[in-house]
Structure formats: structure tokens, C-alpha cells
Amino acid sequence: MTAHSRISEKRGAAPATLRAGHLTAGSTPVRWLLLIHSIPPKPDYLRVKISRRLQRVGAVAIKNSVYVLPPTSEAYEDFQWIVREIEDGGGDAFVSEASLVGEGLTDAAVRARFDAARSDDYRSILEEARSLLVAARRPTPRRRRAAPGAKPATPQFSNEQELAKLRRRFEAVAAIDFFGAGEGQAASKVLGEIELTIRQQRAQTHRQGATMRFDGATWVTRRDVHVDRIGSAWLIRRFIDRRPVFRFVDPKRYAYTSGELRFDMFEAEYTHVGDACTFETLLGQFVPNDPALREIAEIVHDVDCKDAKFRRDEAAGLARLISGIATLCPRDEDRLERGARLFDDLYAAFGGTGHS
């Protein structure tokens, strides 16, 4: 490949054509943004890290160690950050704005590589979305009060979580779908069908009056409460039971008393179900239609389960705040009190307005 190009300064201001963010066609040569780099063989992780970075910004390879993006200001900034990471790792890299000439590497062929990469991403989302649509359309059983030791099923809430994950994946792919790969419309359509199905199920759940309420029940959980139990106790007090009584027990010495409701402990009425934490289980059982609470549930999940399932940026901050509460408050009752103020603020930040 030969290229008539103007080499931009490393980490410098974007060229004027990049700031304009346009891609010309016809008689005017199409301009592209190239990242040309050399990575040392060691450490091994650097090559993997840079490869993932390039995939994340949507770049495609046109030659060995040559990646391309459409010439936009955002692409230029993305490439400059990757240049810095390569250089910090002992490699060499530079960014070039160029027109492609020769060896059959046409502009149309490059655009086809972008479309192929995004089509693969969309097809993966579409496959999972179709499976989720089938699951979402299954009849939802009427919910009944859980018996002691039972694990309440929350298929509707689980479907909403899976839809939220697929939505985020779709939006991430769409953000780097520079030329409109055809499979994107099909994936968007199925995601819309899932959302419609879930909305219809919410309405049905509301009509059935499936959401239960308690008044003065005894709620039992393990001592030394942390994020899932603090959040769950807040959820219980604010949305589920107007006058809850909380007991904190040593699980090795605890003996069940009839009428108690256990949460986040062995054989509890409300605890982890599948990969859902206790907060998610309670939310799906009692308050499934509150968007602000669903946001909080994802954050609590990422902190408690440590699996980055929802990749919530707020998780690290919540984890640090809960750690501070646990350090300052040896008594579980005090942790619940301070934690309640924290979750009240978090709920308001997500636009929550519900009350018990």
C-alpha cells in the first residue's frame, strides 16, 4: 500500500479535516485516519491490551500493524490515547491522515471491513435477543407469597436485566458502526419487541396485584451487614414493610422461628437466585416496575457479586462508601441507619420518587 498523507503531530491538535469530521467521496479522494504502530514482543499483555483498545474504538486492520478509522475528531482522540499507551509500554506509534492508493485496497473495500466487523457484533446480539424474546413471551405465572425456604422466581425482572445488558451492548456497537451495517436494524427491531413484551407483562403484573406488602414482620439476616444486606434492608423498610423489625444473627447458632422472613442467608426466603443478589431478588418480587431501583440493583450487584456483570461506573464509589460505613459503625443497626441515608440519596439521584 502507498499513501499520500499528511503526518499529524503525536498528541497534537486534530487536523482541520478531522475537526470538520466529514468523509468526502466522488472525485475527491476519501481521507482516512491511520494508526501505524510497532509493539515490542514483551510484555505479552501489551499486545492483547492494545488489540482490545482498537476493537473498542471500532478500528479495523488494513495491514499488519496498520489500523484505520474514519477521520473524525473523536477517532483522532481515540487513536492518540492508544498511541500514548503503546509508547508507555515501550512501543512506537503515530497517527496519519491519508488517502489510500494502490494494491487493490479501495475505499469501498475498507468500508466493507467496517461493515463486516459490526455485522458480526450485531449478529451476536441478535442471536441472544431472539432467545430472550422467546423467554420473555413465556406466560408469567401468578406470584404467590413465598413459603419458608422457597426461592421466589422472578422471570420478568431477570428478562429486564438481560434486556438492559443487550441494550448497552447494542448502543456500544452502534457508536462505532460508522457506515450503518444492515444487521443493526434487525437487532434493534428484536430489542424493541422484547421491550414491548416486558411492558405488557408489567401491566399484567399490576392488574393481578402481585406486589405483596408486610406490616411489622421480623426480618432476619446475618451479622456484619455489608452492601447487599444494607441495601436490602433499606429496600424492605422503604418499599415492602412499613414497620420492619430486623434481627442480626450468627448463622451457625441461629434457629428458625415460624413467621420470620430471612434474607441473604442460608435457606432464606429471599436470597441470591441464580446470579442475582438478594437486592435484585427482593426488587423482582416486590417492586419490579421502578426504573430508579433497577439502576441501584445493578450497582449493588456489581459491588456484591464482583463479576462486573453490569459494568456500572458507580460500583467502585458505592463499595468505598459502604466500607467507610462498616468501619465507622460496628453495630449492624447503625450501619442500616447510615446506609439508609446513602441509598435515599442514590435513589433520588436516579429520579426515584416512590415511597413505602
Image (tube, rainbow, N blue to C red):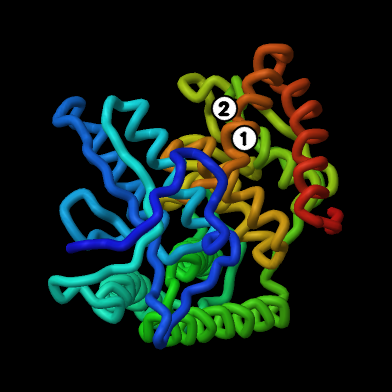
Instruction: Say if 210 sits above or below 133 in the image.
Output: above
Instruction: Say if 42 sits above or below 108 in the image.
Output: above
* Residue 42 seen in the current view: yes
How far apart marks 1 and 2 lie (CA) works out to: 8 Å
Q: Which residue is mark 2?
A: 222
Badge 2 crowding class, 10 Å Cα cut-off, few under 14, some 14 to 19, many 20 or more, is many
Instruction: Say if 230 sits above or below 79 in the image.
Output: above
* Residue 135 seen in the current view: no
* Dot 2 amino acid type: Arg
Viewer-proximal residue among 347 and 254:
347
Residue 90 in which image quadrant: top left
Q: Which dot, 1 or 2, sits closer to the camera?
A: 1
Instruction: Describe residue 73's horizontal placement relative to residue 205 as left or right.
Output: left
Contact, mark 1 vs mark 2 (Cβ under 8 Å): yes
Q: Which residue is mark 1?
A: 229
Viewer-proximal residue among 356 and 35:
35
- Residue 126's label in the rendered image is none
Element assignment for label 2: strand
* Dot 1 amino acid type: Arg
Residue 253: image location, x then y, percent: 50, 20
Residue at horizontal 29 percent and vertical 56 percent from the top: 67
Residue at horizontal 59 percent and vertical 60 percent from the top: 19
Viewer-proximal residue among 337 and 79:
79
Instruction: Describe residue 319's horizontal placement relative to residue 151 as left or right.
Output: right
Quadrant housing the C terminus? bottom right
Viewer-proximal residue among 161 and 7:
7
Residue 208: image location, x then y, percent: 68, 80
Residue at horizontal 36 percent and vertical 26 percent from the top: 88
Quadrant housing the N terminus? bottom left
Q: In the rendered structure, which disc, 1 or 2, sits on the residue that comes first in sequence?
A: 2
